[in-house]
């Protein structure tokens, strides 16, 4: 059974990652808001889509559909047309379904507890954690592709990172290393680090502040 990182390893990881983020974190529009709906839109758009493609569409979407109620009542063809050309067109339909459920059952707002959030079709474990930590300031872990890569390389280094059991272990690692303070910055830092330094191909290991504790260093 894989062990979780000890207290010292967790503390060292948090300290180095947050210091890196303060110096190198990207200035992204959804990091300037705590509006749960805006956070949700950004997270759904960022699924399998690069940041530079999402930014202009994020602004356009919120101009046309500035609230859950506006999205819930919008014509479906207008929603689909606005989403173009991001692709994976089930995503705007899921967003609108979430908006309609929020309006019908939650007074036009996203709930602030994980169980209720995950009852919405289209909001899974990762998206719920993102909304809870970025919009509501809750201590909620996240695990997307970038985060999983970072945590696997630093704390595991062997085995199949895509295996179901490994994925569940990485969720536990994400919860274990999560600080009690600065959760917003820490989770954003994890995503940024995986997107810009600990990338899938040709990671920047020689520039990595976590190299000394990374079980995969150097990544071939």
Image: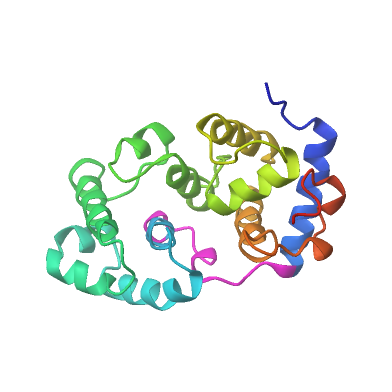
Left or right position of 38 against 64: right
- 74 or 48, nearer to the observer: 48
Closer to us: 95 or 197:
197
Q: Nearer the viewer, residue 18 or 48?
A: 48
Q: How many marks?
A: 0
> Image quarter for residue 215?
top right
Task: From the top left corner, tell me how far across and down residue 198 is, in percent.
Answer: 69, 58
Q: Give the residue at x 39% y 31%.
A: 115
* Viewport quadrant of the C terminus: bottom right
Q: Residue at point 21% right, 64% down?
A: 70
Question: In the picture, residue 89 is in which quadrant?
Answer: bottom left
Q: Is residue 177 visible?
A: yes
| Numbered range of the magenta stretch | 24-38
Looking at the image, residue 8 lies above or below residue 58: above
Q: Position of residue 188 (x, y in %)?
A: 60, 56
Which residue corresponds to the image point at 57% horizontal and 40% vertical from the top-left?
141
Q: Is residue 46 magenta?
A: no
* Horizontal relation, residue 177 to residue 55: left or right: right
Can you see residue 182? no
Q: Position of residue 60 (x, y in %)?
A: 33, 77
Q: x, y (%) of residue 74?
A: 15, 65
* Residue depicted at 58% across the width and 39% down the height: 139
């Amino acid at each position: 059974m894989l062990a979780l990182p000890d207290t010292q390893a967790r503390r060292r990881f948090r300290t180095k990652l947050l210091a890196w983020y303060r110096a190198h974190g990207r200035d992204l529009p959804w990091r300037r808001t705590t509006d749960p709906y805006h956070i949700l839109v950004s997270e759904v758009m960022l699924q399998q889509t690069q940041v530079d493609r999402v930014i202009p569409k994020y602004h356009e979407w919120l101009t046309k559909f500035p609230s859950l109620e506006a999205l819930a009542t919008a014509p479906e063809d207008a929603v689909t047309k606005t989403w173009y050309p991001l692709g994976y067109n089930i995503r705007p339909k899921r967003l609108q379904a979430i908006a309609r459920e929020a309006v019908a059952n939650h007074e036009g707002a996203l709930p602030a507890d994980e169980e209720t959030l995950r009852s919405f079709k289209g909001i899974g474990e990762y998206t719920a954690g993102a909304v809870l930590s970025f919009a509501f300031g809750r201590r909620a872990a996240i695990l997307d592709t970038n985060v999983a890569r970072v945590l696997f390389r630093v704390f595991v280094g062997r085995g199949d990172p895509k295996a179901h059991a490994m994925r569940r272990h990485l969720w536990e690692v994400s919860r274990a290393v999560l600080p009690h303070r600065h959760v917003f910055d820490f989770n954003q830092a994890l995503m940024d680090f995986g997107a810009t330094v600990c990338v899938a191909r040709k990671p920047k290991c020689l520039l990595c502040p976590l190299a000394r504790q990374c079980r995969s260093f150097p990544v071939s």
